[in-house]
Image (tube, rainbow, N blue to C red):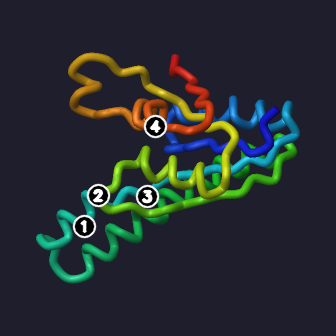
């Protein structure tokens, strides 16, 4: 039986399928739900040197606000299902998103990690990488992957 379910969200359709499954599991197990969205500021920081004035700070703020919106929407869905979710919105610069999620899973501590996966293969996988794969390879708890349609 799971008591602590961590669901990673990014606002995509596939991520939302993972969220729905995590909410369903939390309801069935009477478990605590924690939602996480990692705000990756790597690109913003690397490009920041080329921006003029306060453009850099505006970009960082926009990235943070977009992440908060994703967490707020996911929280609303969980509350509508009768849950009282916890949330995490960590920021990273250069660290892999999968690593940040795994650190949060260990710190909380999660019994299971739930996330959507695009199931990319071939060149798409090489170019885009896979947060899901990084989590599956290194997780110390079970991982539930929900494939997109």
Image depth: mark 4 or mark 2 in front: 4
The reply to whether discs 4 and 3 touch (Cβ–Cβ < 8 Å) is: no
* Label 1 environment density (alpha carbons within 10 Å; few <14, some 14–19, many ≥20): some
Point out the tag, 1 or 2, that comes first from the N-terminus.
Answer: 1
- The image's mark for residue 39 is 3
Image depth: mark 1 or mark 4 in front: 4
Point out the tag, 3 or 2, that comes first from the N-terminus.
Answer: 3
Image depth: mark 4 or mark 3 in front: 4
Q: Position of residue 29 (x, y in %)?
A: 85, 34
Residue, disc 1: 45
136 w.r.t. 105: above or below? above
The N terminus lies in quadrant: top right
The reply to whether discs 1 and 2 touch (Cβ–Cβ < 8 Å) is: yes
91 w.r.t. 124: above or below? below
Q: Position of residue 62 (x, y in %)?
A: 40, 65
Point out the tag, 1 or 4, that comes first from the N-terminus.
Answer: 1
Marks 1 and 4, Cα distance to the nearest angstrom?
27 Å
Point out the tag, 4 or 3, that comes first from the N-terminus.
Answer: 3
Point out the tag, 3 or 1, that comes first from the N-terminus.
Answer: 3
* Label 3 environment density (alpha carbons within 10 Å; few <14, some 14–19, many ≥20): many
Residue, disc 4: 138
Marks 3 and 2, Cα distance to the nearest angstrom?
11 Å
Q: Position of residue 20 (x, y in %)?
A: 69, 32
SS at mark 3? strand
Point out the tag, 4 or 2, that comes first from the N-terminus.
Answer: 2
Residue, disc 2: 94
Marks 3 and 1, Cα distance to the nearest angstrom?
12 Å
SS at mark 2? loop
Residue drawn at x 52%, y 38% is 139
Give the residue furthest to the front: 140
Left or right placement of residue 101 versus residue 81 in this view = left
């Amino acid at each position: 039986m799971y008591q602590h379910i961590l669901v990673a969200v990014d606002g995509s359709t596939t991520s939302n399928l993972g969220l729905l499954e995590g909410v369903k599991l939390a309801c069935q197990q009477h478990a605590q739900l924690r939602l996480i969205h990692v705000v990756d500021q790597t690109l913003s920081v690397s490009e920041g040197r080329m921006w003029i004035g306060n453009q850099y700070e505006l970009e960082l703020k926009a990235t943070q606000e977009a992440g908060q919106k994703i967490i707020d929407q996911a929280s609303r869905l969980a509350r509508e299902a009768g849950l009282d979710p916890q949330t995490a919105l960590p920021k990273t610069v250069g660290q892999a998103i999968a690593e940040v999620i795994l650190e949060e899973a260990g710190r909380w501590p999660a019994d299971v990690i739930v996330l959507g996966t695009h199931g990319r293969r071939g060149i798409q996988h090489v170019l885009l990488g896979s947060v899901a794969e990084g989590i599956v390879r290194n997780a110390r708890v079970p991982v539930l992957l929900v494939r997109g349609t």
